[in-house]
Amino acid sequence: MGFTKFVLAIIRKLRSVLLLCITISLLFYYTFENEIDILNSYAENEYLPSIKKELTDEPGPLSGSNFDSKMDPSNNHALLEEVEAPPTPVKSKNKEINLADPITLKEKNKYFPLLLSEPKNDPTLPFNLNDHSIALNNENDLSLLTYKEHYPVLLENPLPAISLRDNKIPLASIQVNKFEDGGALHSTIKNDIKKLFIQSWDQENLIELARKNKEKRWPIKLIDSLDTLYMMDQQTQFQVALDVICDTDFRIPPKNVDLVHIPDLSTRVLGGLISAYELSQNQTLLVKAKHVADFILRAFDTPNRLPILDYSWKSPFNNRFPYTNTTMEDLTKMSLELTRLSQLTHQDKYFDAVYRVFESISSSVEDFHIESLFPVRVDASGCQLLTTKEISSGAHQKNSKIMKSIDESLKFIHCYQTGKILPQRGENQKHNVAELTTIDQPFYDSLVKLFHQLNQHDILNLYETTTVPNDPNKNKDTIIEKNTLHGQNKRSTGMTTSFNSKTLFQNAIAKLQDYLIFQPLLPEITSNVSLISSLYAKGTFAPTTNELDVEMLRTFSMDTKLCSLGSTLSMGSKIFADTSVEKQSLDKLAGTLTKSCFEIYKLFNGAMPREFSLDPCLNSENGCQFDREGKIDDISKGLYKGDGDRLFNTESSGSNDLRVKVADDKEKKHKNKIHDSELAGDDKMTKLYTFVKDEKYNGITLINSDEIDMQNGKWRNDDEQPLWVNKMRSKRILSPEIIESVFYRYRTTGDQEWRNMGQDILALIMKNVQLNGVGAKGMWKISELKDSSDDRFSDRRALPSSWFSQTLKYLYLLFSDSDDFHLDDFIFTAGGHLIRREVSVKTNL
Ligand SMILES: *[C@@H]1O[C@H](CO)[C@@H](O)[C@H](O)[C@H]1NC(C)=O
Ligand SMILES: *[C@@H]1O[C@H](CO)[C@@H](O)[C@H](O)[C@H]1NC(C)=O
Ligand SMILES: *[C@@H]1O[C@H](CO)[C@@H](O)[C@H](O)[C@H]1NC(C)=O
């Protein structure tokens, strides 16, 4: 008895020790493996100093280090010659590398990332990816399920604690306590909206579709509508939908999917799953969300840890930089979802991915022509290519931030990793390309909401000390960090204490008010309508004075997506305003923009163009009334000179008269000091902002006088387009932006006018829906307007999934009890999904 007990006790003791030993040795093993991989990649990248350097001044072939030939039998010598090599190399003494050969490319791509501009320019597309020799591994399914990172994060940036950052600053309340109309639910309207939802949801037949296409697609629209189903008490349907979703494998997309749009996957699928989990607490949903997020993280496996937004997940050539042609607004769209997942799973990796994106962006704020506003498209690779001269001087061998890579034409290049996002600049041009710029609503929206979600912890200013490495390549830097290519190469991280979300937000709004807001000429004067323009900004650098002269040309066109800025500003006024004056100013702007969008919405009878361009009202004394005869006259006089892009980017097309600048007095007073990364040392560059003269017509899309029927004053190619509109893109009746802002206005101000506006919007939607969905005997179908737009995600006949996840949800909540889904307890993601705020009340209040 005693003996067996003794033996058992020993075994029990040993078991835990043994387990520990095994764990530790496994840990060591993997660390070691990883280390070898990293070392190998260093060698391949020529990060390590070569033992014998035979660098001469003569340009031409790089004398390869001994390392190279050892690590890579196919030889790295004579890289520069390879660049010019014909596709089918003739055997010579220098063994040549033909990257156009898929097998070679796959081998080289293990170490040298591909630098591509956009998915459609992917040079590997013509390869037959099912070819056994280049396919990922075997045809084994498992090879897709598992993924080995090229650029593992060595130290994750931890999620900040739930507790308030600063106990002395009370937590701002987003929602007001007092509502003019009491804030109680409005049951008739609420029921109407519910009916509308049920009708359209049934009509879409999402469950059936999901079951039928189980192998081919993920039930994205079903997931997107889950939380709305739940809110509207459709428990039976919710259960059925849940069964279908819990039965779907989310670890990898269906095999027939090649390209995955990561922001869409995040906003609709990940957001939808998390939101449904928050409401129902069904653990399976959380597991599914984790699967999706783990897949999403694969797209972040790039040298600078910024995501590849259109991710070709099955490609055997998956060592890549993010695209050099990336839409700025998509870069931060997954922030709230991933951050919330870190909170729910206590795994930092999701938050870390978000953090690094924000870090890159914030370190680039000053690098664009107009600070705090970002171009619509940016270079997310952060690569600055080395010139042939720089390469021949051997600079690339001394700098750990220079990475040998493969470009779109399958040639070797060298990329200097700036760690930033960069303006899209043409070949060797520094500042000569006009950047199309506007306010990046999704970015600023994430900034506000993250601040709220993280209880005042500022993602741009999280870690006061340097205990946490910000640079994923930190270890590499320790190997060689001298003689950097670009002078001192001081990377301003933007992570100083004076730089934070609040100042960035406020700067951006100031720029918005100074440069982007304009009043349009409208056929009916209702109230002061203010809209947001985009602008082309073009810089000319004067080395003698060290000034960057930024010329700006407004387009007077607005993307309707910007109508949701009203919600961002409403929240911003609660969170990012220090004084009551600032608060009022932000709040007023939010109100003005929301009302203005509504006015335009009414003028279009509820069929809102996704983008429209109008004539600016430069002299509001006359009341900004559109003058039909005057416009016809101006057009015939040729005053509408044409497209801003064309005018701005053609050097000598007789448009020099346009370049007479009008100094913008306001800006002259506070010259912006900026530190340009391309200038060595601490030289500061000054930016001067000027508007191009005669701007009323300049930015407006080219109008030939023959585009218009002078007699009738109508556009020739679209008689539905009113004359006061210069250009418009496909119209929508079910889109959510305006109602989103109206909902936020109501909850943050308590003013009844917003509910009234909501009723008008609902009425207009209903009118359009019935008009558009003609059916027999008073039965109508809900459908979006037919259009020929190139929306790549929406099936044109079907309803947009934002109809369920946003439009109807915000309408419904507007008329619900204002305590339902209180804005201090819940945060809405960009896709309209709910995440719960974690507040540890006890420790703070
Ligand atoms: C979650 O939902 C699935 C599908 O309806 C169900 O099978 C499972 O039991 C649920 N889990 C919990 C914890 O309720
Ligand atoms: C970037 O991509 C867009 C859309 O594909 C395209 O219109 C634009 O010309 C591209 N820009 C550059 C610099 O390639
Ligand atoms: C419209 O703007 C003008 C000038 O800014 C101002 O005088 C007027 O009061 C405004 N009207 C409304 C209705 O806000």
Image (cartoon, helix red, strand yellow):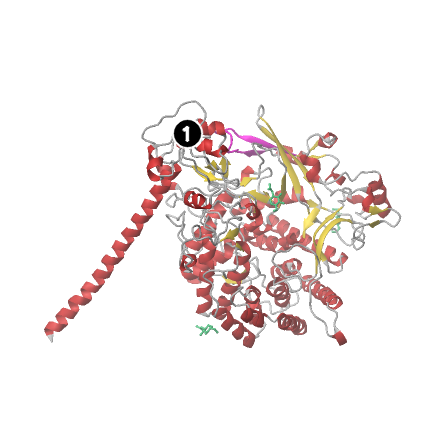
- Nearer to the camera, 283 or 515: 283
Per the image, is 844 magenta?
no
Mark 1 CB lies closer than 8 A to ligand 2 = no
* Magenta stretch in the rendered image: 672-689
Note whether 132 is above or below 421 in the view shown: below
Note whether 608 is above or below 185 in the view shown: above
Residue at position x 82%, y 50% from top?
716
Q: Quadrant of the C terminus?
A: bottom left
Q: Quadrant of the N terminus?
A: bottom left
In the picture as drawn, the residue positioned furthest to the right comes out as 711
Residue at position x 76%, y 40% from top?
697
Note whether 390 is above or below 419 in the view shown: above
- Nearer to the camera, 744 or 87: 87
- Residue 560 pos. (x, y %): 67, 53
Q: Amino acid at mark 1?
A: Leu
- Residue 383 pos. (x, y %): 49, 39
Q: Quadrant of residue 647?
A: top right
Residue at position x 78%, y 40% from top?
640
Neighbour tally class for label 1: few under 14, some 14-19, many 20 plus, Cα within 10 Å:
many
- Residue 799 pos. (x, y %): 65, 64
Name the residue carrying label 1.
62
Q: Is residue 576 visible?
A: no
In the picture as drawn, the residue positioned furthest to the front comes out as 90
